[in-house]
């Protein structure tokens, strides 16, 4: 015999899961959009605008983290984009890397975002050098060198973090080449 009330409860549970997933997708889109805007603001030296965008994201990130049981692609992408944006701001403006604890994300999402930071540091360093801000370009190279040294101490298995970490090596090489060129001038 089929108990119809059981299936009614299952439908209600599935509808609740779907609603939660849809809300997490919308939040993820917002966080990704705001992260990209914050990074772009830092590259344009619009630091107040970047700070406001990061502040706006913090509430959205807290809400998204409450959906941790929906750790799907959009969820992961949003959190690592947030970490990347916060780190770009922290390194460029505050000259320090934000701590995982202050960002309220998991260690995996934090490390993924930190690994993505290297590409933005290359972009910032190249633009700084083009604008004659050689000291900033060299500072960013030194920072990435130190960060890479810390990341080497991990034993990353194959996966997203390993792949992104391997990319840091090539970004560091670009900054080392840039630093060599700047010193040769």
Image (cartoon, rainbow, N blue to C red):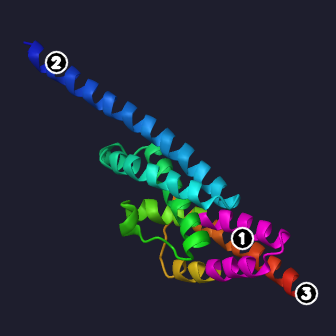
Residue labelled with disc 2: 7
Q: Secondary structure at mark 1?
A: helix
The Cα–Cα distance between marks 3 and 2, rounded to whole angstroms, is 74 Å
Q: Residue at x 72, y 77 (%)?
A: 136
Residue labelled with disc 1: 170
Residue labelled with disc 3: 184
Q: Which of pointers 1 and 3 lies earlier in the amino acid sequence?
A: 1
Main SS, magenta region, reads helix
Q: How many marks?
A: 3
The Cα–Cα distance between marks 1 and 3, rounded to whole angstroms, is 21 Å
Q: Residue at x 62, y 56 (%)?
A: 39
Closer-to-camera residue (153/181): 181
Relative image position of residue 98 (x, y in whole percent): 47, 70
Please tell me whether mark 1 or mark 3 is closer to you in this view.
3
Say if mark 3 contacts mark 2, CB within 8 Å: no
Question: Is residue 28 found left or right of 171 in the rendered image?
Answer: left
Relative image position of residue 28 (x, y in whole percent): 46, 42
Residue 10 position (above or below residue 81): above
Q: Secondary structure at mark 3?
A: helix
Alpha-carbon neighbours of circle 3 within 10 Å: few (<14), some, or many (≥20)?
few
Magenta residues, start to end = 117-144
Residue 102 picture quarter: bottom left
Alpha-carbon neighbours of circle 1 within 10 Å: few (<14), some, or many (≥20)?
few
Q: Is residue 122 magenta?
A: yes
In this orientation, does residue 161 appear?
Answer: no
């Amino acid at each position: 015999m089929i108990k119809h009330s059981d299936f009614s409860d299952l439908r209600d549970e599935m509808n609740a899961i779907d609603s939660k997933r849809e809300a997490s997708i919308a939040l993820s889109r917002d966080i990704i959009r705001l992260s990209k805007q914050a990074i772009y603001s830092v590259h344009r030296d619009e630091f107040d605008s970047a700070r406001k965008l990061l502040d706006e994201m913090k509430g959205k990130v807290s809400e998204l983290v409450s959906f941790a049981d929906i750790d799907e692609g959009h969820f992961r992408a949003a959190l690592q984009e947030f970490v990347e944006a916060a780190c770009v701001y922290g390194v460029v403006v505050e000259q320090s890397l934000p701590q995982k604890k202050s960002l309220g994300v998991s260690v995996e999402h934090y490390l993924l975002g930190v690994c993505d930071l290297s590409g933005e540091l290359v972009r910032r360093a190249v633009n700084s050098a083009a604008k004659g801000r050689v000291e900033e370009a060299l500072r960013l190279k030194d920072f990435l060198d130190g960060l890479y040294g810390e990341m080497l101490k991990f034993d990353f298995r194959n996966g997203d973090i390993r792949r992104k970490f391997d990319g840091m090596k090539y970004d560091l090489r670009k900054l080392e080449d840039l630093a060599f060129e700047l010193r040769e001038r």
